[in-house]
Image (cartoon, rainbow, N blue to C red):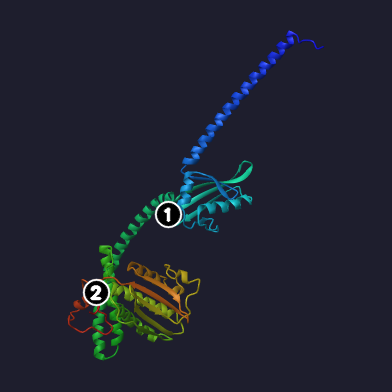
Amino acid sequence: MASAPDDESVQDLRLKYADLVRKYQDLVERSDRRASQGLAIYRLGAFGLRFSPSALAMVDEGRIQLSNARFAQLARSTRGKLVAVEPKSAPSFSDLRALLASHAAEMLHGPTVAGDLLYREGPEVILSIHLERGLHEGREVVLALIEDVAGRARADQDPARTREALLHRERLRVLGELAASIAHDLGNTLRGASFQLSALRGAASAGGEGADPVRAIQQRVELASEVVTRLHDFAHTGALGVTAVRLDRVVSQAAALVDIDFRDAAPPVEVRVGIPELPAVRGSAAELSLLFVNLLRNARDAMPEGGIVTVTGRQTDRAVLVSVADQGKGFSPAVQPRLFEPFFTTKGVRGTGLGLWLASGTMKRLGGTIRAQNRPGGGAVIVLTFPLQHVSRAARPSAARRASARRGSSAHAPPRPGRVRHDGPKT
């Protein structure tokens, strides 16, 4: 028969029980505190996930399992093609979810634990994407942070644009001063040469020999005088004036200017002009005449064994097209992309590399285009497109006419052969 416990044993048991109760209460209190702290952290994280200005998402098993409101907004707005900016070799995607799923799968199956991407959707959206591997419920997932940095990129470009605008203004100021100086000095020289050529032409006409070369030199001097006048006007006004120009007449004048050089070349080069009477376009006859002279000379240089340069023109609904074609070797794939770069030339020391660049600038300023391509049968062709717009006639006489007036020529005298008058289209 078991004996009853004594009072001392009962007291020890009570003390141990009380100690266990206190420890249990402490454990429960600590557990409650940790649970409350964890709940607060969870609520704070959920709040940040929801209202963060950055898009946040978790990719698990190829799907977006968690995301915030900003991510949903970006996913809805980026419906165009997302093209990789960095790295450039990355593929393009049709939407943001497909992009994240693809890159997350690649990261989970490779050694990379974190990485950055830059994607663009048109000029208005640039997405900076940071990807990082993590654990969720014992599985590896990919966490994504996405920001639209297009606004930041534009803000970074504004100071650079301001500096460039100030530099451009300063360049124009210096260019204006230089243009005024060149126009003044070169104009005086050309006027003196024009007077001397007038006397020489009279002597050549009396003798019956040398009239054509003198007339060609006279035309070039008058053309240069008009260019100098335009340069002088630009120095004072900051703008280059345009008027109604007949391209058939301008091309004929340019062909006449190079005719003697081409005929006396060895081997000879022939220029065939087949341009009908076309509507007037915006431009400057002197400037466009020099443009076509440069194109004709380029075509001649492309045919070291001689040949034919063909100039044709036609009208479309909205433009006038003029083509200058040669029978040379055409453009190589390495040369063609650089044809309109300044100072790029294939002629070595004989070329400046400015002819096609200046032609491109002229066409852009007139609202037209210039393009170069190879001909199927060999050779190359330069195609100039002039938009058809309303143009007014010249408000003042050309430099050539002013030079004639200074020489005392009659206003009713018939024009000399090869001379182009800058009047409007026939009605």
Q: Residue 28's quadrant in the figure?
A: top right
Q: Residue 395's quadrant in the figure?
A: bottom left
| Residue on which disc 1 sits | 124
Q: Position of residue 391 (x, y in %)?
A: 26, 71
| Residue on which disc 2 sits | 399
Q: Position of residue 410 (x, y in %)?
A: 17, 81
Can residue 148 be seen by looking at this rendering?
Answer: no
Which residue shows up at 25% across the image and 88% down it?
A: 205
Q: Secondary structure at mark 1?
A: loop
Which residue shows up at 57% across the image and 27% down it?
A: 33
Q: Position of residue 302 (x, y in %)?
A: 45, 79
Which residue shows up at 37% across the image and 74% down it?
A: 384
Which residue shows up at 23% across the image and 74% down it?
A: 398
Of label 1 and label 2, which has the lower sequence position? 1
Whole-angstrom CA distance, mark 1 to mark 2, is 49 Å
Quadrant the C terminus occupies: bottom left
Q: Position of residue 235 (x, y in %)?
A: 27, 64
Tag 1: residue type? Answer: Glu
Q: Secondary structure at mark 2?
A: helix
Tag 2: residue type? Answer: Ala
Label 2 Cα neighbours within 10 Å, binned few <14 / some 14-19 / many ≥20: some
Q: Residue furthest front?
A: 1
Q: Nearer the viewer, residue 266 or 199?
A: 266
Is 219 positioned to the left or the right of 31 in the image? Answer: left
Q: Residue furthest top?
A: 7
Is 382 positioned to the left or the right of 29 in the image? Answer: left
Up-down: is 410 above or below 73? below
